[in-house]
Image: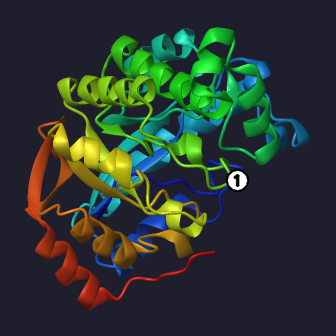
Amino acid sequence: MHSHHSHSGQFCQHAADTLEEMVLRAIDLQLSLFCLTEHMPRYDVVDLYPEELESKTTTEDLERTFSAYITEARRLQEKYKDKIDIIVGFEGEAINSEYTKYINNIFAQYKPDYFIGSLHHTSGVPIDFDQENWEYALTHSATDAKLINKLGGINNLFLTYFTEFKKFITEVDPKPAVIGHLDLITLYSRGVKILKVPLLIDAISDLIKTAIESNCLFEINSSGVRKGRAPYPDTLVAKMIIDLGGKFCLSDDSHNVDQVALNYSIVCDYVQELGIDTLWRLKLVDNKITHESFPVTDFRNWVEKINPPSTTK
């Protein structure tokens, strides 16, 4: 089985365990593909997280860490090539339009195999770091009073997020091979889900169409379960992707060895509840990323054989 999204404590301050330990855990669980996707460096000090400020991390430190990550990831890719497919990538940022340009520079300098297109900020404010920042984004990302009155504050925040996500995919070059946790904006929404508000649904639909036209896969990300919600994306968004012809891949978004393939049994049930019968994976052929399909029955057979770890905490 596969994961297209992972992090390690060796190169990420809010994770644990070494990159090699992550790979070895994936091998133990008989994954056939494990993608390495540490965060891209942020180059502006205003975008450093509280944990980085506390540890006195600089933007230069982030750049050095990312360079070391690419070197180690390539070493592991070669070392374990007979045991598991490793694809070396990174998780992109779209804090503003300058970051989309910076992604192109990363490809030119480090030559990764691919990247995950994720949105962790709305109007420049982190929306998945903690409740406080999410609440700040809720009150500061909406500037159009007429729109707020029409949609309501939280739906306007959702609208801003999905509109910025589409802008990111439209502007960035190269395009992301995978779209990360598409409805991450709901993580701290205190149980408020995306409603079928026409303006909002249209924005999500436009985003999905743009991603499909850009040949992106959509990850079904099991990390939502350990964060107390359904896998990303939730049912409404997942069904929109299905209706529009999108393709799904699997991710655990692991941040330590215990989270590799965590809750994949729950994801397998979720996939079958959605009526999906085919999943996809990335494949590296002649140094180029391609897609390969496989039946959901293969996923079920792996789950029954491996009995992957499961928790809702």
- According to the image, what is the colour scheme of the structure? rainbow
Quarter of the N terminus within the rendering: bottom left
**Which is nearer the eye, 134 or 111?**
134
Give the residue at mark 1: 14
Is the residue 312 above or below the residue 71 in the image? below
Question: What residue is rendered at 57% in x and 36% in y?
Answer: 66
In the image, is 125 to the left or to the right of 27?
Answer: right
Percent across and percent down for residue 223 are 51, 61
Q: Pointer 1: residues within 10 angstroms few (<14), some, or many (20+)?
A: few
For the C terminus, the image quarter is bottom right
Query: What residue is at 18 percent from the left and 42 percent from the top?
Result: 243
Q: Is residue 218 above or below residue 49?
A: below
The image shows residue 199 at horizontal and vertical percentages of: 43, 23
**Residue 297 falls in image quadrant:** bottom left
Image coordinates for residue 144, horizontal then vertical, percent: 65, 9
Q: Give me the residue at 54% from left, 80% from top.
A: 311
* Residue closest to the eye, 203 or 223: 203
Residue 57 is drawn in which quadrant?
top right
Under circle 1, the secondary element is loop
Residue kind at label 1, given as amino acid type: His
Residue 313 makes an appearance in the image: yes
Query: Residue 184 versus residue 98: which sits nearer the camera?
Result: 184
Write down the quadrant of residue 167 in the picture.
Answer: top left
User: Which residue lies at the image location 38% right of the left edge and 11% below the top edge?
Assistant: 171
Question: Residue 306, percent across and down?
Answer: 31, 87
Instruction: Establish if 269 lies above or below 9.
Output: below
- Residue 61 in the figure: left or right of residue 176: right
The mark tally for this picture is 1
Look at the image and tell me whether residue 1 can be seen.
no
